[in-house]
Image (cartoon, coloured by chain):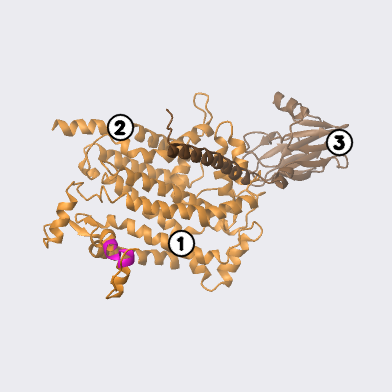
Chain colours: A brown, B orange
Amino acid sequence: MMDESRRGFIGKAFGAVAAVGGIASLIAMKKTWDPLPSVMSAGFTTVDVSGLEANKLEVVVWRGKPVFILKYTADMKPTDGRSVKIGENYFSVMIGLCTHLGCIPGYEGDKKLFKCACHGGEYSADGKQTFGPPPRPLDIPPFKLDGVTLVLGEEGPEYKKMTAKA
Amino acid sequence: MAEFKKADSMLEWFDQRLGVVNFAKVMMTEYWIPKNINFLWAMGVLLTVLFTFLLVSGIFLLMYYKPDAAMAFDSVNYTIMQEVAYGWLFRHIHAVGASVVFLVIYIHMFTGIYYGSYKKGREMIWISGMLLFVLFSAEGFSGYMLPWGQMSYWAAYVITEIFGGIPVIGDELVVWIRGNFYVADSTLTRFFMLHVLLIPLAILGAIVFHFYSLRFPHVNNEDGEFFDFDEEAEKYLAGNKKESKVVPFWPVFLSKDFFVLGFFMLFFFYLVFFHYSFAMDPINFDKADGLKTPAHIYPEWYFLWSYEVLRGWFFEIAGISGKDLGLMAFGFANIIFVLLPWLDRSPMVKPANQRPYFKYWFWLMMADLMVLTEFGKLPPTGPNAWVGFWASLVFLVLFIALPFITKAEAKKVEGK
Protein backbone atom coordinates (compact mmCIF):
# COMPACT_ATOMS: atom_id res chain seq x y z
CA MET A 1 0.00 0.00 0.00
CA MET A 2 1.41 3.37 -1.04
CA ASP A 3 1.27 6.38 1.22
CA GLU A 4 1.02 9.21 -1.31
CA SER A 5 1.47 12.04 1.14
CA ARG A 6 4.66 14.09 1.19
CA ARG A 7 5.38 13.06 4.78
CA GLY A 8 5.10 9.41 3.75
CA PHE A 9 7.61 10.00 0.98
CA ILE A 10 10.02 11.78 3.34
CA GLY A 11 9.70 8.89 5.79
CA LYS A 12 10.53 6.28 3.17
CA ALA A 13 13.41 8.32 1.76
CA PHE A 14 14.90 8.70 5.23
CA GLY A 15 14.40 4.99 5.92
CA ALA A 16 16.30 4.08 2.76
CA VAL A 17 19.19 6.44 3.53
CA ALA A 18 19.36 5.20 7.15
CA ALA A 19 19.34 1.54 6.06
CA VAL A 20 22.17 2.03 3.55
CA GLY A 21 24.16 4.07 6.08
CA GLY A 22 23.52 1.55 8.83
CA ILE A 23 24.63 -1.43 6.74
CA ALA A 24 27.73 0.45 5.51
CA SER A 25 28.71 1.32 9.09
CA LEU A 26 28.29 -2.28 10.23
CA ILE A 27 30.58 -3.46 7.43
CA ALA A 28 33.16 -0.82 8.37
CA MET A 29 32.98 -1.83 12.05
CA LYS A 30 33.29 -5.53 11.22
CA LYS A 31 36.35 -4.85 9.06
CA THR A 32 37.97 -2.67 11.71
CA TRP A 33 37.99 -5.75 13.95
CA ASP A 34 39.52 -7.97 11.25
CA PRO A 35 43.15 -9.02 11.76
CA LEU A 36 45.44 -6.36 10.28
CA PRO A 37 47.30 -6.99 6.99
CA SER A 38 50.56 -7.26 8.95
CA VAL A 39 48.97 -9.93 11.14
CA MET A 40 47.64 -11.84 8.12
CA SER A 41 51.04 -11.86 6.39
CA ALA A 42 52.66 -12.94 9.65
CA GLY A 43 50.19 -15.83 9.63
CA PHE A 44 52.47 -17.57 7.13
CA THR A 45 55.91 -18.65 8.21
CA THR A 46 58.44 -19.55 5.54
CA VAL A 47 61.36 -21.81 6.41
CA ASP A 48 64.24 -22.84 4.15
CA VAL A 49 64.99 -26.41 5.29
CA SER A 50 68.03 -27.02 3.09
CA GLY A 51 70.49 -25.82 5.72
CA LEU A 52 69.10 -27.90 8.60
CA GLU A 53 71.23 -30.47 10.36
CA ALA A 54 69.91 -34.02 10.74
CA ASN A 55 68.63 -35.10 14.18
CA LYS A 56 68.83 -31.53 15.48
CA LEU A 57 65.48 -29.97 16.33
CA GLU A 58 64.59 -26.67 14.66
CA VAL A 59 61.79 -24.70 16.35
CA VAL A 60 60.04 -21.92 14.44
CA VAL A 61 57.12 -19.81 15.63
CA TRP A 62 53.97 -19.93 13.54
CA ARG A 63 50.83 -18.03 14.64
CA GLY A 64 52.15 -17.81 18.17
CA LYS A 65 52.79 -21.55 18.41
CA PRO A 66 56.09 -23.42 18.31
CA VAL A 67 56.48 -25.65 15.27
CA PHE A 68 59.05 -28.51 15.35
CA ILE A 69 61.02 -29.28 12.23
CA LEU A 70 63.23 -32.36 12.52
CA LYS A 71 65.44 -33.61 9.68
CA TYR A 72 65.82 -37.41 9.68
CA THR A 73 69.18 -39.14 9.68
CA ALA A 74 69.77 -41.88 7.11
CA ASP A 75 68.87 -44.65 9.58
CA MET A 76 65.54 -43.08 10.67
CA LYS A 77 62.62 -44.65 8.85
CA PRO A 78 59.89 -42.34 7.46
CA THR A 79 56.31 -42.97 8.65
CA ASP A 80 53.49 -42.96 6.15
CA GLY A 81 51.16 -39.99 6.81
CA ARG A 82 53.53 -38.29 9.24
CA SER A 83 56.89 -37.77 7.56
CA VAL A 84 57.36 -35.18 4.85
CA LYS A 85 59.78 -35.63 1.98
CA ILE A 86 61.42 -32.35 1.10
CA GLY A 87 64.06 -32.67 -1.63
CA GLU A 88 66.00 -35.85 -0.87
CA ASN A 89 65.36 -35.93 2.87
CA TYR A 90 62.54 -36.81 5.20
CA PHE A 91 61.35 -34.42 7.92
CA SER A 92 58.88 -34.32 10.83
CA VAL A 93 56.82 -31.10 10.78
CA MET A 94 54.63 -30.82 13.90
CA ILE A 95 53.07 -28.30 16.24
CA GLY A 96 55.28 -28.46 19.34
CA LEU A 97 52.54 -28.52 21.95
CA CYS A 98 51.93 -31.66 23.97
CA THR A 99 48.46 -32.95 23.12
CA HIS A 100 47.84 -33.61 26.80
CA LEU A 101 47.83 -30.10 28.27
CA GLY A 102 49.80 -27.96 25.86
CA CYS A 103 53.29 -27.92 27.36
CA ILE A 104 56.25 -27.83 24.98
CA PRO A 105 58.14 -31.16 24.84
CA GLY A 106 61.93 -31.22 24.49
CA TYR A 107 63.86 -33.36 21.98
CA GLU A 108 66.39 -35.88 23.18
CA GLY A 109 68.61 -36.49 20.16
CA ASP A 110 70.49 -39.50 21.56
CA LYS A 111 67.25 -41.41 22.24
CA LYS A 112 65.45 -39.88 19.24
CA LEU A 113 62.33 -39.03 21.24
CA PHE A 114 60.35 -36.06 22.48
CA LYS A 115 59.80 -35.86 26.22
CA CYS A 116 57.27 -33.57 27.90
CA ALA A 117 58.50 -32.38 31.30
CA CYS A 118 55.04 -31.50 32.63
CA HIS A 119 53.46 -34.96 32.92
CA GLY A 120 56.06 -37.29 31.45
CA GLY A 121 54.48 -37.83 28.03
CA GLU A 122 56.80 -39.19 25.34
CA TYR A 123 56.61 -39.13 21.54
CA SER A 124 58.73 -40.84 18.90
CA ALA A 125 60.64 -38.72 16.36
CA ASP A 126 57.65 -38.80 14.00
CA GLY A 127 55.41 -37.42 16.79
CA LYS A 128 53.48 -40.57 17.76
CA GLN A 129 52.75 -40.82 21.47
CA THR A 130 54.68 -43.69 23.01
CA PHE A 131 54.31 -43.19 26.75
CA GLY A 132 52.27 -41.29 29.32
CA PRO A 133 49.05 -39.28 29.16
CA PRO A 134 49.05 -37.74 25.61
CA PRO A 135 45.78 -38.79 23.91
CA ARG A 136 46.97 -38.39 20.29
CA PRO A 137 50.13 -37.74 18.24
CA LEU A 138 51.50 -34.22 17.88
CA ASP A 139 49.36 -32.17 15.48
CA ILE A 140 50.60 -31.42 11.99
CA PRO A 141 50.19 -27.79 10.86
CA PRO A 142 48.91 -26.96 7.38
CA PHE A 143 51.92 -26.53 5.08
CA LYS A 144 52.89 -26.17 1.46
CA LEU A 145 56.15 -27.16 -0.22
CA ASP A 146 57.89 -24.77 -2.54
CA GLY A 147 61.11 -26.53 -3.54
CA VAL A 148 63.17 -26.73 -0.35
CA THR A 149 61.06 -24.05 1.28
CA LEU A 150 58.35 -24.93 3.74
CA VAL A 151 55.38 -22.51 3.93
CA LEU A 152 53.38 -22.93 7.15
CA GLY A 153 49.75 -21.79 7.13
CA GLU A 154 48.83 -22.83 3.61
CA GLU A 155 47.40 -26.24 2.62
CA GLY A 156 49.50 -27.72 -0.18
CA PRO A 157 48.89 -31.04 -2.02
CA GLU A 158 51.41 -32.90 0.21
CA TYR A 159 49.55 -31.80 3.34
CA LYS A 160 46.18 -32.77 1.90
CA LYS A 161 47.53 -36.19 0.97
CA MET A 162 48.84 -36.69 4.52
CA THR A 163 45.61 -35.65 6.26
CA ALA A 164 43.58 -37.82 3.88
CA LYS A 165 45.59 -40.84 5.08
CA ALA A 166 45.32 -39.98 8.76
CA MET B 1 9.67 32.11 26.32
CA ALA B 2 7.75 31.17 29.42
CA GLU B 3 7.39 33.89 32.02
CA PHE B 4 9.62 33.60 35.11
CA LYS B 5 8.98 35.34 38.44
CA LYS B 6 11.95 36.44 40.48
CA ALA B 7 12.81 33.51 42.75
CA ASP B 8 12.73 33.98 46.53
CA SER B 9 15.16 31.18 47.29
CA MET B 10 17.83 29.11 45.62
CA LEU B 11 15.53 26.08 45.70
CA GLU B 12 12.80 28.04 43.94
CA TRP B 13 15.32 29.28 41.36
CA PHE B 14 16.26 25.71 40.48
CA ASP B 15 12.67 24.52 40.73
CA GLN B 16 11.56 27.11 38.15
CA ARG B 17 14.19 25.93 35.74
CA LEU B 18 14.48 22.19 36.42
CA GLY B 19 11.35 21.21 38.36
CA VAL B 20 13.53 19.78 41.14
CA VAL B 21 10.75 19.67 43.76
CA ASN B 22 8.59 17.39 41.65
CA PHE B 23 11.58 15.39 40.52
CA ALA B 24 12.61 14.67 44.12
CA LYS B 25 9.06 13.57 44.92
CA VAL B 26 8.81 11.20 41.97
CA MET B 27 12.28 9.72 42.47
CA MET B 28 12.61 9.75 46.25
CA THR B 29 10.06 10.97 48.77
CA GLU B 30 6.98 9.61 46.97
CA TYR B 31 8.51 6.51 45.42
CA TRP B 32 6.87 3.78 47.48
CA ILE B 33 8.51 0.62 48.77
CA PRO B 34 6.65 -2.13 50.67
CA LYS B 35 7.23 -2.30 54.41
CA ASN B 36 7.15 -6.06 54.57
CA ILE B 37 10.71 -6.76 53.44
CA ASN B 38 14.00 -7.90 54.99
CA PHE B 39 17.72 -7.24 54.59
CA LEU B 40 17.80 -9.16 51.30
CA TRP B 41 15.99 -6.21 49.74
CA ALA B 42 19.09 -4.07 50.36
CA MET B 43 21.19 -5.88 47.72
CA GLY B 44 20.22 -3.49 44.92
CA VAL B 45 21.61 -0.50 46.78
CA LEU B 46 24.70 -2.55 47.75
CA LEU B 47 25.29 -3.31 44.08
CA THR B 48 24.89 0.33 43.09
CA VAL B 49 27.48 1.31 45.70
CA LEU B 50 29.84 -1.49 44.66
CA PHE B 51 29.57 -0.46 41.03
CA THR B 52 30.49 3.08 42.05
CA PHE B 53 33.54 1.74 43.94
CA LEU B 54 34.59 -0.19 40.83
CA LEU B 55 34.11 2.86 38.64
CA VAL B 56 36.12 5.17 40.89
CA SER B 57 38.95 2.71 41.58
CA GLY B 58 38.98 1.91 37.86
CA ILE B 59 39.42 5.59 36.97
CA PHE B 60 42.48 5.77 39.21
CA LEU B 61 43.97 2.56 37.78
CA LEU B 62 43.34 3.85 34.26
CA MET B 63 45.72 6.76 34.85
CA TYR B 64 48.73 4.43 35.09
CA TYR B 65 47.66 1.28 33.24
CA LYS B 66 49.22 0.74 29.79
CA PRO B 67 47.18 -1.37 27.33
CA ASP B 68 50.11 -2.87 25.47
CA ALA B 69 51.20 -6.51 25.51
CA ALA B 70 54.79 -5.47 26.27
CA MET B 71 53.98 -2.95 29.01
CA ALA B 72 50.70 -4.01 30.63
CA PHE B 73 52.17 -6.47 33.14
CA ASP B 74 54.77 -4.07 34.52
CA SER B 75 52.40 -1.12 34.54
CA VAL B 76 50.18 -3.12 36.91
CA ASN B 77 52.67 -5.06 38.99
CA TYR B 78 55.44 -2.50 39.18
CA THR B 79 54.05 0.99 38.53
CA ILE B 80 50.63 0.68 40.16
CA MET B 81 51.54 -1.79 42.90
CA GLN B 82 54.89 -0.33 43.95
CA GLU B 83 55.33 3.22 42.73
CA VAL B 84 51.93 4.93 42.76
CA ALA B 85 50.93 6.07 46.25
CA TYR B 86 47.94 3.93 47.29
CA GLY B 87 47.99 2.29 43.86
CA TRP B 88 47.82 -1.07 45.64
CA LEU B 89 44.67 0.07 47.45
CA PHE B 90 42.88 0.94 44.22
CA ARG B 91 43.94 -2.36 42.69
CA HIS B 92 42.77 -4.33 45.72
CA ILE B 93 39.45 -2.46 45.80
CA HIS B 94 39.02 -3.14 42.08
CA ALA B 95 39.95 -6.83 42.29
CA VAL B 96 38.05 -7.61 45.50
CA GLY B 97 35.13 -5.44 44.33
CA ALA B 98 34.88 -7.39 41.07
CA SER B 99 34.68 -10.65 43.01
CA VAL B 100 32.28 -9.41 45.70
CA VAL B 101 29.99 -7.75 43.16
CA PHE B 102 29.28 -11.23 41.81
CA LEU B 103 28.61 -12.57 45.31
CA VAL B 104 25.99 -9.85 45.82
CA ILE B 105 24.60 -10.31 42.29
CA TYR B 106 24.06 -14.01 43.07
CA ILE B 107 22.37 -13.19 46.40
CA HIS B 108 20.20 -10.59 44.63
CA MET B 109 19.31 -13.06 41.88
CA PHE B 110 18.50 -15.99 44.13
CA THR B 111 16.46 -13.71 46.40
CA GLY B 112 14.42 -12.89 43.30
CA ILE B 113 14.00 -16.57 42.48
CA TYR B 114 13.17 -17.55 46.07
CA TYR B 115 10.43 -14.91 46.45
CA GLY B 116 9.08 -15.30 42.90
CA SER B 117 9.89 -11.68 42.03
CA TYR B 118 10.20 -12.42 38.31
CA LYS B 119 6.60 -13.03 37.28
CA LYS B 120 3.11 -11.56 37.13
CA GLY B 121 4.16 -8.18 35.77
CA ARG B 122 7.76 -8.29 36.99
CA GLU B 123 9.19 -10.01 33.88
CA MET B 124 11.00 -6.91 32.63
CA ILE B 125 12.71 -6.43 35.99
CA TRP B 126 14.02 -9.98 35.73
CA ILE B 127 15.12 -9.67 32.09
CA SER B 128 16.92 -6.36 32.64
CA GLY B 129 18.59 -7.89 35.70
CA MET B 130 19.79 -10.87 33.69
CA LEU B 131 21.05 -8.46 31.03
CA LEU B 132 23.09 -6.80 33.78
CA PHE B 133 24.43 -10.21 34.81
CA VAL B 134 25.62 -10.86 31.26
CA LEU B 135 27.20 -7.39 31.02
CA PHE B 136 28.94 -7.78 34.37
CA SER B 137 30.25 -11.19 33.24
CA ALA B 138 31.66 -9.61 30.08
CA GLU B 139 33.11 -6.78 32.15
CA GLY B 140 34.71 -9.24 34.57
CA PHE B 141 36.17 -11.36 31.80
CA SER B 142 37.57 -8.42 29.80
CA GLY B 143 39.04 -6.88 32.96
CA TYR B 144 40.71 -10.13 33.98
CA MET B 145 42.73 -10.01 30.76
CA LEU B 146 44.25 -6.57 31.41
CA PRO B 147 47.04 -7.42 33.95
CA TRP B 148 48.42 -9.72 31.19
CA GLY B 149 49.56 -12.44 33.58
CA GLN B 150 49.51 -16.17 32.81
CA MET B 151 45.91 -16.63 34.07
CA SER B 152 44.80 -13.53 32.16
CA TYR B 153 46.34 -14.86 29.00
CA TRP B 154 45.12 -18.42 29.19
CA ALA B 155 41.64 -17.52 30.40
CA ALA B 156 41.40 -15.23 27.36
CA TYR B 157 42.74 -18.05 25.21
CA VAL B 158 40.29 -20.68 26.49
CA ILE B 159 37.22 -18.42 26.50
CA THR B 160 37.78 -17.01 23.01
CA GLU B 161 38.45 -20.58 21.85
CA ILE B 162 34.89 -21.46 22.95
CA PHE B 163 33.51 -19.46 20.01
CA GLY B 164 35.37 -21.89 17.73
CA GLY B 165 32.65 -24.43 18.55
CA ILE B 166 30.04 -22.45 16.62
CA PRO B 167 29.32 -24.36 13.38
CA VAL B 168 30.72 -23.16 10.01
CA ILE B 169 32.05 -19.72 11.04
CA GLY B 170 33.65 -20.81 14.32
CA ASP B 171 37.34 -20.82 13.37
CA GLU B 172 37.19 -17.50 11.53
CA LEU B 173 35.13 -15.97 14.33
CA VAL B 174 37.87 -16.79 16.87
CA VAL B 175 40.50 -15.06 14.69
CA TRP B 176 38.14 -12.11 14.22
CA ILE B 177 37.53 -11.72 17.95
CA ARG B 178 41.25 -11.94 18.77
CA GLY B 179 42.38 -9.85 15.82
CA ASN B 180 45.14 -12.42 15.41
CA PHE B 181 45.61 -16.16 15.16
CA TYR B 182 46.34 -16.30 18.87
CA VAL B 183 45.72 -14.04 21.87
CA ALA B 184 47.98 -11.10 21.08
CA ASP B 185 48.40 -7.35 21.48
CA SER B 186 45.38 -6.70 19.24
CA THR B 187 43.26 -8.83 21.60
CA LEU B 188 44.45 -6.87 24.62
CA THR B 189 43.75 -3.44 23.13
CA ARG B 190 40.25 -4.28 21.97
CA PHE B 191 39.27 -5.90 25.27
CA PHE B 192 40.75 -2.87 27.02
CA MET B 193 38.37 -0.66 25.03
CA LEU B 194 35.44 -2.93 25.91
CA HIS B 195 36.39 -2.98 29.59
CA VAL B 196 36.87 0.75 30.13
CA LEU B 197 34.29 2.22 27.78
CA LEU B 198 31.73 0.22 25.86
CA ILE B 199 30.64 -2.28 28.51
CA PRO B 200 30.57 0.26 31.40
CA LEU B 201 28.41 2.53 29.21
CA ALA B 202 26.07 -0.36 28.51
CA ILE B 203 26.02 -1.24 32.23
CA LEU B 204 25.08 2.33 33.18
CA GLY B 205 22.25 2.28 30.65
CA ALA B 206 21.07 -1.12 31.83
CA ILE B 207 21.10 0.00 35.49
CA VAL B 208 18.86 2.99 34.66
CA PHE B 209 16.56 0.66 32.71
CA HIS B 210 16.53 -1.88 35.56
CA PHE B 211 15.46 0.85 38.03
CA TYR B 212 12.85 2.13 35.61
CA SER B 213 11.40 -1.35 35.12
CA LEU B 214 10.61 -1.39 38.87
CA ARG B 215 8.35 1.65 38.75
CA PHE B 216 5.16 0.09 37.38
CA PRO B 217 5.06 -3.41 38.89
CA HIS B 218 6.73 -2.16 42.11
CA VAL B 219 9.06 -3.98 44.47
CA ASN B 220 7.89 -7.43 45.65
CA ASN B 221 7.55 -8.19 49.37
CA GLU B 222 8.23 -11.07 51.75
CA ASP B 223 4.79 -12.68 51.29
CA GLY B 224 4.33 -11.97 47.58
CA GLU B 225 1.25 -9.92 48.50
CA PHE B 226 -0.37 -7.78 45.80
CA PHE B 227 -1.92 -4.51 46.94
CA ASP B 228 -2.88 -1.08 45.61
CA PHE B 229 0.19 1.12 45.97
CA ASP B 230 -1.75 4.36 45.35
CA GLU B 231 -4.20 3.52 48.13
CA GLU B 232 -1.42 2.65 50.59
CA ALA B 233 0.54 5.78 49.60
CA GLU B 234 -2.52 7.94 50.31
CA LYS B 235 -2.77 6.38 53.76
CA TYR B 236 0.87 7.16 54.41
CA LEU B 237 0.58 10.75 53.20
CA ALA B 238 -2.60 11.22 55.30
CA GLY B 239 -0.56 10.36 58.38
CA ASN B 240 -1.65 6.73 58.86
CA LYS B 241 1.93 5.57 58.62
CA LYS B 242 1.39 2.59 60.86
CA GLU B 243 -1.55 1.26 58.86
CA SER B 244 0.00 1.88 55.45
CA LYS B 245 1.82 -1.02 53.80
CA VAL B 246 4.38 1.24 52.17
CA VAL B 247 7.21 3.60 53.07
CA PRO B 248 8.90 6.24 50.90
CA PHE B 249 12.21 5.30 49.23
CA TRP B 250 13.83 8.34 50.84
CA PRO B 251 14.37 8.75 53.74
CA VAL B 252 12.72 5.65 55.25
CA PHE B 253 13.77 2.77 52.98
CA LEU B 254 17.28 4.09 52.28
CA SER B 255 18.04 4.70 55.96
CA LYS B 256 17.64 0.96 56.58
CA ASP B 257 19.59 0.15 53.45
CA PHE B 258 22.45 2.34 54.60
CA PHE B 259 22.51 0.42 57.85
CA VAL B 260 22.93 -2.85 55.95
CA LEU B 261 25.45 -1.09 53.74
CA GLY B 262 27.45 -0.13 56.83
CA PHE B 263 27.86 -3.78 57.83
CA PHE B 264 28.63 -4.75 54.28
CA MET B 265 31.35 -2.10 53.94
CA LEU B 266 33.07 -3.40 57.09
CA PHE B 267 33.11 -6.86 55.50
CA PHE B 268 34.24 -5.46 52.15
CA PHE B 269 37.14 -3.45 53.53
CA TYR B 270 38.15 -6.33 55.79
CA LEU B 271 38.61 -8.30 52.56
CA VAL B 272 40.37 -5.42 50.79
CA PHE B 273 42.92 -4.91 53.55
CA PHE B 274 43.41 -8.32 55.13
CA HIS B 275 42.09 -11.01 52.83
CA TYR B 276 42.54 -9.79 49.26
CA SER B 277 44.55 -12.77 48.00
CA PHE B 278 41.44 -14.78 47.06
CA ALA B 279 40.87 -12.26 44.26
CA MET B 280 44.51 -12.27 43.09
CA ASP B 281 45.54 -15.65 41.70
CA PRO B 282 49.29 -16.29 42.25
CA ILE B 283 49.65 -17.70 38.72
CA ASN B 284 48.64 -14.28 37.39
CA PHE B 285 51.81 -12.81 38.87
CA ASP B 286 53.76 -14.61 36.13
CA LYS B 287 53.85 -12.61 32.93
CA ALA B 288 51.73 -13.90 30.02
CA ASP B 289 53.59 -16.42 27.88
CA GLY B 290 51.86 -17.76 24.79
CA LEU B 291 54.36 -20.60 24.56
CA LYS B 292 53.85 -21.95 28.08
CA THR B 293 50.47 -23.16 29.36
CA PRO B 294 49.95 -23.33 33.14
CA ALA B 295 49.35 -26.93 34.21
CA HIS B 296 45.85 -26.17 35.46
CA ILE B 297 43.59 -23.39 34.14
CA TYR B 298 40.42 -22.36 35.96
CA PRO B 299 38.30 -19.21 35.94
CA GLU B 300 37.42 -16.95 38.89
CA TRP B 301 34.98 -18.52 41.36
CA TYR B 302 31.88 -16.84 39.97
CA PHE B 303 32.29 -18.51 36.58
CA LEU B 304 33.09 -21.97 37.98
CA TRP B 305 29.53 -23.36 37.82
CA SER B 306 29.09 -22.60 34.12
CA TYR B 307 32.68 -23.69 33.41
CA GLU B 308 31.90 -27.04 35.03
CA VAL B 309 28.72 -27.37 32.93
CA LEU B 310 31.02 -26.90 29.91
CA ARG B 311 33.63 -29.39 31.11
CA GLY B 312 31.21 -32.00 32.46
CA TRP B 313 30.67 -33.55 29.04
CA PHE B 314 33.86 -35.39 28.34
CA PHE B 315 32.72 -38.34 26.24
CA GLU B 316 30.85 -38.90 23.00
CA ILE B 317 27.09 -39.55 23.10
CA ALA B 318 25.17 -40.61 19.96
CA GLY B 319 27.98 -39.50 17.66
CA ILE B 320 28.20 -35.98 19.12
CA SER B 321 31.62 -35.23 20.59
CA GLY B 322 32.04 -34.34 24.25
CA LYS B 323 33.32 -30.90 23.27
CA ASP B 324 30.17 -30.08 21.29
CA LEU B 325 27.88 -31.47 24.00
CA GLY B 326 29.68 -29.31 26.56
CA LEU B 327 29.25 -26.24 24.36
CA MET B 328 25.53 -26.95 23.95
CA ALA B 329 25.09 -27.42 27.70
CA PHE B 330 27.10 -24.23 28.31
CA GLY B 331 24.93 -22.25 25.87
CA PHE B 332 21.81 -23.65 27.54
CA ALA B 333 23.06 -22.73 31.03
CA ASN B 334 23.78 -19.18 29.96
CA ILE B 335 20.36 -18.37 28.52
CA ILE B 336 18.06 -20.53 30.61
CA PHE B 337 17.83 -18.21 33.63
CA VAL B 338 16.47 -15.43 31.38
CA LEU B 339 13.51 -17.64 30.50
CA LEU B 340 12.62 -18.35 34.12
CA PRO B 341 9.38 -16.25 34.11
CA TRP B 342 8.02 -18.54 31.39
CA LEU B 343 9.41 -21.80 32.71
CA ASP B 344 7.63 -21.28 36.02
CA ARG B 345 4.05 -22.18 35.06
CA SER B 346 2.60 -21.70 38.51
CA PRO B 347 0.89 -18.34 39.12
CA MET B 348 1.87 -18.42 42.82
CA VAL B 349 4.02 -15.49 43.97
CA LYS B 350 5.17 -16.79 47.35
CA PRO B 351 8.47 -17.48 49.04
CA ALA B 352 9.76 -20.85 47.83
CA ASN B 353 9.27 -22.57 51.20
CA GLN B 354 5.50 -21.90 50.96
CA ARG B 355 5.25 -23.50 47.54
CA PRO B 356 4.63 -27.26 47.75
CA TYR B 357 6.88 -28.40 44.84
CA PHE B 358 8.95 -25.37 43.92
CA LYS B 359 10.75 -25.46 47.25
CA TYR B 360 12.38 -28.79 46.38
CA TRP B 361 13.34 -27.48 42.96
CA PHE B 362 14.88 -24.31 44.42
CA TRP B 363 17.03 -26.03 47.04
CA LEU B 364 18.08 -28.79 44.64
CA MET B 365 19.19 -26.13 42.15
CA MET B 366 21.15 -24.30 44.85
CA ALA B 367 22.85 -27.53 45.93
CA ASP B 368 23.68 -28.41 42.34
CA LEU B 369 25.19 -24.98 41.70
CA MET B 370 27.37 -25.41 44.78
CA VAL B 371 28.59 -28.83 43.62
CA LEU B 372 29.32 -27.40 40.16
CA THR B 373 31.24 -24.50 41.70
CA GLU B 374 33.22 -26.78 44.00
CA PHE B 375 34.22 -29.22 41.28
CA GLY B 376 34.77 -26.51 38.66
CA LYS B 377 38.05 -25.67 40.36
CA LEU B 378 39.34 -29.25 40.72
CA PRO B 379 41.28 -30.96 37.93
CA PRO B 380 38.76 -32.90 35.78
CA THR B 381 40.28 -36.32 36.26
CA GLY B 382 39.01 -39.64 37.59
CA PRO B 383 35.89 -39.43 39.78
CA ASN B 384 35.88 -35.60 39.57
CA ALA B 385 35.01 -35.85 35.89
CA TRP B 386 32.00 -38.03 36.72
CA VAL B 387 30.77 -35.73 39.50
CA GLY B 388 31.03 -32.92 36.96
CA PHE B 389 29.05 -34.89 34.41
CA TRP B 390 26.23 -35.79 36.79
CA ALA B 391 26.01 -32.31 38.32
CA SER B 392 25.91 -30.83 34.82
CA LEU B 393 23.19 -33.27 33.80
CA VAL B 394 21.15 -32.52 36.96
CA PHE B 395 21.34 -28.80 36.10
CA LEU B 396 19.86 -29.38 32.64
CA VAL B 397 17.21 -31.78 33.91
CA LEU B 398 16.12 -29.36 36.64
CA PHE B 399 15.39 -26.62 34.12
CA ILE B 400 13.72 -28.95 31.64
CA ALA B 401 11.53 -30.31 34.45
CA LEU B 402 10.60 -26.90 35.89
CA PRO B 403 7.53 -26.24 33.66
CA PHE B 404 6.11 -29.66 34.56
CA ILE B 405 6.84 -29.31 38.28
CA THR B 406 5.25 -25.87 38.47
CA LYS B 407 2.25 -26.92 36.34
CA ALA B 408 1.63 -29.78 38.77
CA GLU B 409 2.02 -27.36 41.65
CA ALA B 410 -0.55 -24.98 40.12
CA LYS B 411 -3.03 -27.89 39.84
CA LYS B 412 -2.43 -29.03 43.40
CA VAL B 413 -2.92 -25.52 44.81
CA GLU B 414 -6.11 -25.01 42.76
CA GLY B 415 -7.48 -28.37 43.91
CA LYS B 416 -7.33 -27.33 47.56
Dot 1, how many residues are within 10 Å of its Cα: few (below 14), some (14-19), or many (20+)? some
Q: Look at the picture and state if B21 lies above or below A128.
A: below
- The quarter of the displayed image where residue A146 is located: top right
Specify whether residue B195 is painted magenta. no
Image quarter of the C terminus of chain B: top left
Task: Give the amino acid type for the residue marked by disc 2 in the picture.
Answer: Pro
Residue B383 seen in this snapshot? no
| Residue highlighted by disc 1 | B55
Q: Give a yes or no on whether discs 3 and 1 share a subunit.
A: no
Q: Chain of mark 3?
A: A
| Residue highlighted by disc 3 | A148
Residue A23 picture location, percent across and down:
56, 39
Q: Main secondary structure of the magenta part?
A: helix
Residue A131 appears left or right of A79 = left
Q: Chain of mark 2?
A: B
For the point 73% across and 42% down, the residue is A67
Task: Give the amino acid type for the residue marked by disc 1 in the picture.
Answer: Leu
| Residue highlighted by disc 2 | B403
Q: Secondary structure at mark 1?
A: helix
Q: Secondary structure at mark 3?
A: loop
Separation of residues labelled 2 and 3 (CA atoms): 65 Å
Residue B148 picture location, percent across and down:
60, 56
Q: Chain of mark 1?
A: B
For the point 78% across and 28% down, the residue is A158
User: Disc 1 or disc 2, which is closer to the eye?
Assistant: 1
Residue in front for this viewpoint, B21 or B220: B21
Q: Secondary structure at mark 2?
A: helix
Q: Give a yes or no on whether discs 2 and 3 share a subunit.
A: no
Dot 2, how many residues are within 10 Å of its Cα: few (below 14), some (14-19), or many (20+)? some
Residue A148 appears left or right of B125 = right
The magenta-colored residue range is B16-23
